[in-house]
């Protein structure tokens, strides 16, 4: 007679946090302004403002935008501020930087509002292997937020978690 298979993970007090579940839905767009520069290196204010004024900002409606310049041009702060002011009425969120910074800052907002009291005194696994881009900085921020409340913190899956922290 075969013994019944018991899932001890589901019966334990172990809590799993999957940051992928918090991933903000919406398209991410990287906007490179190099083509708005003279020879992709020099910002000429009059021509730059003409590009900004002629650009169709509605294409960014309800999207997340990472604004950057891929060349070694020196871009004055006001140029990014000007573009951001044009994007603001349309986008969900805009950053000056790359796509990873965009996701990092989005997760920072989420983690700032994440209630962790449910994890007080419990072992917690921060789930790994996500299909969506969860930045390393988000994992670090979550670990720091859990440390004051969790009994222990691990990373990975319940069957093969890597221990990271244990309260003394």
Image (spheres, grey):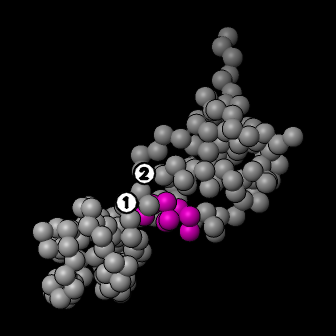
Seen in the picture, residue 111 relative to 2 is either above or below; the reply is below
Which residue occupies the extreme top position in the image? Answer: 1
Residue carrying label 2: 133
Left or right position of 15 against 108: right
Q: Which quadrant of the view contains residue 164?
A: top right
Q: Residue at x 82, y 42 (%)?
A: 167
Q: Which disc, if any, is residue 5?
A: none
Q: Position of residue 146 (x, y in %)?
A: 72, 53
Left or right position of 7 against 101: right
Seen in the picture, residue 81 relative to 74 is either above or below; the reply is below
Mark count: 2
Q: What's the magenta region?
A: 102-109
Q: Dot 2: within a 10 Å radius of its alpha carbon, few (fewer than 14), some, or many (20 or more) residues?
A: some
Q: Which disc, if any, is residue 99?
A: 1
Q: Is residue 112 magenta?
A: no
Left or right position of 11 against 97: right
Q: Residue at x 58, y 35 (%)?
A: 157
Q: Real-space Cα distance between discs 2 and 1?
A: 10 Å
Q: Position of residue 59 (x, y in %)?
A: 23, 77
Q: Secondary structure at mark 2?
A: loop
Dot 2 or dot 1, earlier in sequence: 1
Number of the front mark, 2 or 1: 1
Q: Secondary structure at mark 1?
A: helix
Seen in the picture, residue 81 relative to 35 is either above or below; the reply is below
Q: Is residue 105 magenta?
A: yes
Q: Are marks 2 and 1 in contact (CB under 8 Å)?
A: yes
């Amino acid at each position: 007679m075969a013994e019944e298979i018991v899932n001890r993970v589901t019966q334990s007090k172990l809590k799993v946090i999957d940051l992928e579940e918090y991933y903000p839905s919406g398209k991410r767009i990287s906007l490179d302004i190099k083509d708005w520069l003279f020879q992709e290196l020099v910002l000429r204010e009059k021509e730059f403002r003409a590009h900004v004024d002629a650009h169709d900002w509605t294409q960014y409606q309800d999207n997340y935008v990472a604004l950057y310049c891929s060349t070694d041009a020196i871009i004055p702060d006001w140029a990014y501020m000007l573009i951001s002011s044009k994007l603001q009425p349309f986008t969900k969120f805009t950053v000056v930087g790359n796509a990873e910074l965009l996701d990092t800052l989005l997760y920072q907002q989420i983690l700032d509002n994440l209630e962790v009291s449910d994890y007080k005194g419990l072992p917690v696994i921060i789930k790994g292997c996500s299909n969506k881009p969860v930045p390393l900085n988000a994992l670090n921020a979550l670990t720091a937020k859990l440390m004051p409340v969790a009994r222990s913190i691990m990373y990975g899956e319940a069957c093969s978690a890597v221990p990271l922290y244990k309260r003394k």
